[in-house]
Amino acid sequence: MKLELFGKNYNPSDSLKAITEKKCVKIARRLDDEDAVVKFVVTLENGDYTTDASVITHGITYRAQAVSPSPFDNVDEVIPKLLGQMRKQKDIWGKDKKGSPNVYEEEEV
């Protein structure tokens, strides 16, 4: 998993990078792809920090956004949102389709 942290009108501190890496361990456990990319973009506008997070894996993109006066609080909000989306997608793919399975018997010749 590759983690990228960018800032717009804001320079992300080393402590924010360290906390983000620590919290992304939960996302890494869900991913089975080593080429997955997790991107965080922190933007400072009018005294509020906006954090956009996206996870790109196997051609699927999960996205979440949070706004608050602290970028650290945003990381705490965004990661559960991403995990919820990933859990929901896994549940959808894991379910069997409705109806009975088609069973075809081979004819003896």
Image (cartoon, grey):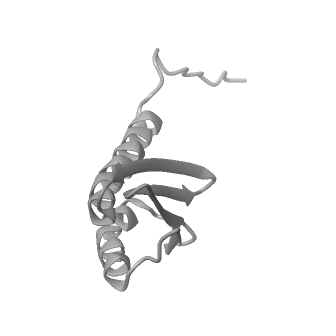
Q: Residue furthest right?
A: 109
- The residue that appears at 30% across and 57% down in the rendered structure is 69
The image position of residue 30, as x and y in percent, is 38, 59
Q: Is residue 38 above or below residue 93?
A: below
Viewer-side residue, 53 vs 29: 53
Q: Residue furthest bottom?
A: 14
- The residue that appears at 38% across and 81% down in the rendered structure is 13
Q: Is residue 53 above or below residue 3?
A: above
The image position of residue 102, as x and y in percent, is 55, 20
> Is 59 positioned to the left or the right of 70 in the image?
right
- The residue that appears at 35% across and 65% down in the rendered structure is 29
Q: Is residue 87 above or below residue 38?
A: above
The part of the image, by quadrant, that contains residue 73 is bottom left
- The number of numbered discs placed on residues in the rendered structure image is 0
Q: Residue furthest top?
A: 99
Viewer-side residue, 33 vs 20: 20
The image position of residue 61, as x and y in percent, is 56, 50
Viewer-side residue, 63 vs 14: 14
The image position of residue 20, as x and y in percent, is 35, 72
The part of the image, by quadrant, that contains residue 50 is bottom left
- The residue that appears at 50% across and 58% down in the rendered structure is 55
Q: Is residue 60 above or below residue 18?
A: above
Question: If the image is split into quadrants, where does the C terminus sit?
Answer: top right
The reply to whether residue 33 is in sight is: no
The reply to whether residue 30 is in sight is: yes
